[in-house]
Amino acid sequence: MSVTDRILSALTTVIRMNDRVEQIAGLMKEQQRRIDDLNGRVIRLETMLELALNRPPAGRSRLMEDD
């Protein structure tokens, strides 16, 4: 192989690697968006669970507890 062929081969490899890195970066951004969405959903579920567990039993109100 001549020096020119080696240089062209190296440049081709770098261009391919750059394309792959950009593709992976896009996938990482999409994954981060999904993780953020799931995190928000878990927070909402935790809030609903806490509210449900702290709710007084059916048939009794908090006003009746003071009597």
Image (cartoon, helix red, strand yellow):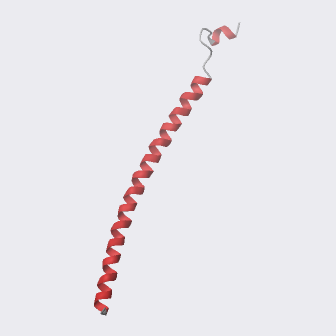
Q: Where is residue 30 in the image (x, y as percent from the top left)?
A: 39, 52
Q: Is residue 29 above or below residue 4?
A: above
Q: Dividing the image into 4 quarters, which one contains the N terminus? A: bottom left
Nearest the viewer among 65 and 26 is 26
Q: Please state the horizontal and vertical placement of residue 15, each as a whole percent of the image.
A: 32, 74
Residue furthest front in the image:
1
In terms of image quadrants, where is residue 26? Answer: bottom left
Residue found at x 33% / y 72%: 16
Among all residues in the image, which is located at the extreme bottom? 2
Give residue 38's position: percent from left, percent from top. Answer: 47, 42
Compared to residue 56, the image places residue 35 above or below, namely below
**Lateral position of residue 28 relative to residue 10, left or right:** right
Look at the picture and state if 16 lies above or below 28: below
Is residue 7 toward the left or the right of residue 48 in the image?
left
Number of marks: 0
Quarter occupied by the C terminus: top right
Depth check, front residue: 42 or 5: 5
- State the residue at coordinates (68%, 10%): 65
Q: Which image quarter: residue 48?
A: top right
Residue for point 61% across, 11% down? 61
**Residue at the extreme right of the image, as rendered:** 67
Q: Which residue is drawn at 44% across and 51% down?
A: 32
Residue 43, percent across and down? 53, 37
32 relative to 23, above or below: above
